[in-house]
Amino acid sequence: MKTVKKIALASVCVALCALMFAGCEKKKTQKEEKIDYSKVVTLSEYKQISLKTDDVDRQVEAQINQILDQNKTYKKVTKGKVADGDTVNIYYVGKIDGEAFDGGSLTKETNPEGYDLTIGSKTFIDGFEESLIGKKIGTTSDITVTFPEQYSANPDLAGKPAVFTVTINSKQGEAIIPEFNDEFVKNNLSNYDSAKAYKEELRQNMVQSMAWDKVMDGCKINEYPKKLVEENKSSLETTLNTYLEQQGSTLDDYLTSMNMTKESYESQKEQTAKDEVEKEVICNAIAEKEKINVSDEDYQEQIKELLTTTNSKDEEELSDKYKSYYGVDAKTLVTKDLLLKKIQEYLAGNVVEE
């Protein structure tokens, strides 16, 4: 019943590739020429990086405020009528020719917490959300809608009329923002014992990120190695296809939801791939110049953690999962991610705060 969410290609890759740095695999062969990173990129000053303390602090506060916003709750309103833009909590049962169909119901028995639907979001098929406007909270009513003629989420429903019995449980009222304190941190950021500890580590990470961004902004890419660009484009395609399969959608659905043509999609894919290549060549240029590398001990420690978080029995199974999701083996992506972290830590050590 839901449509594919509007999410940019780069965001899809970030969402699926939390551990992925560059998203490309260099399949090494004996005949492959090594890239001279010192030629493809002109590095900016990176041995002394100036950052303003106020800028860092503002970024830290913004991150904390974002976390608080993500954990906000709402007063529950149980009186009044539904208006456009309201977020309502509902149960619903969908039927076609008097018979319930798969995926068309969400009830108190199956989902006690209900479903939060924002009116006007176009999350559900046309006519569903609009039919709730003006209805009283706490009431149950039938609404009649028709599935689109082209409905890839479930072609068997395409073009068919359906009746949904909808119960409006409540709607969201005023937002309640939690306070950032030790209790909040212990309940929501389980790896930390106090607000102070979390804020200190967040600040360290922010300095690393800002130092990296400043160096990147000052670098000049002299050449985008074609092989790396093509590898990244291939990986982006695999990642997007994986996401769409998980959503039960197709590339055509994605292009429609993003209001994109095939040509604009190809252009965005090209640019996203180049953005990733830019990160990779800068990272490797600094690594080569400063003789920074990822040790086998670093790699094995990260693999051990990933085996647990991905519920993989061994490195081979983990690598198969990575190839399935990203079209790239685990060793390539994990090594790149670790190298980026090492470079960011190195750059943070060169920061002078004003």
Image (cartoon, helix red, strand yellow):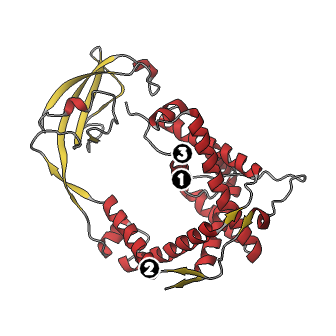
Q: Quadrant location of residue 209?
A: bottom right
State yes or no: discs 3 and 1 in contact (Cβ < 8 Å): no
Q: Can residue 294 be seen? A: no
Label 3: state its secondary structure: helix
Whole-number angstrom distance, CA of label 3 to CA of label 1: 9 Å
Does label 3 or label 1 sit earlier along the sequence? 3
Q: Quadrant location of residue 352?
A: bottom right
Point out the image quarter for the N terminus.
top left
Check disc 1 and give the amino acid type: Val
Above or below: residue 316 compared with residue 278: above
Label 2: state its secondary structure: helix
Check disc 2 and give the amino acid type: Glu
The local crowd at label 3, few if under 14, some if 14 to 19, many if 20 or more residues have their Cα within 10 Å, is some
Report the residue marked by disc 3.
9
Report the residue marked by disc 1.
14
Check disc 3 and give the amino acid type: Leu
Does label 3 or label 2 sit earlier along the sequence? 3
Above or below: residue 266 compared with residue 190: above
Does label 2 or label 1 sit earlier along the sequence? 1
Report the residue marked by disc 2.
200
The image's mark for residue 119 is: none
| Residue 107 in the image, given as x and y percentages of width and height | 26, 35
Whole-number angstrom distance, CA of label 2 to CA of label 1: 25 Å
Name the residue at 25% across, 39% down. 119
| Residue 223 in the image, given as x and y percentages of width and height | 74, 57
- Mark 3 or 1: the one toward you: 3
Above or below: residue 163 compared with residue 83: above
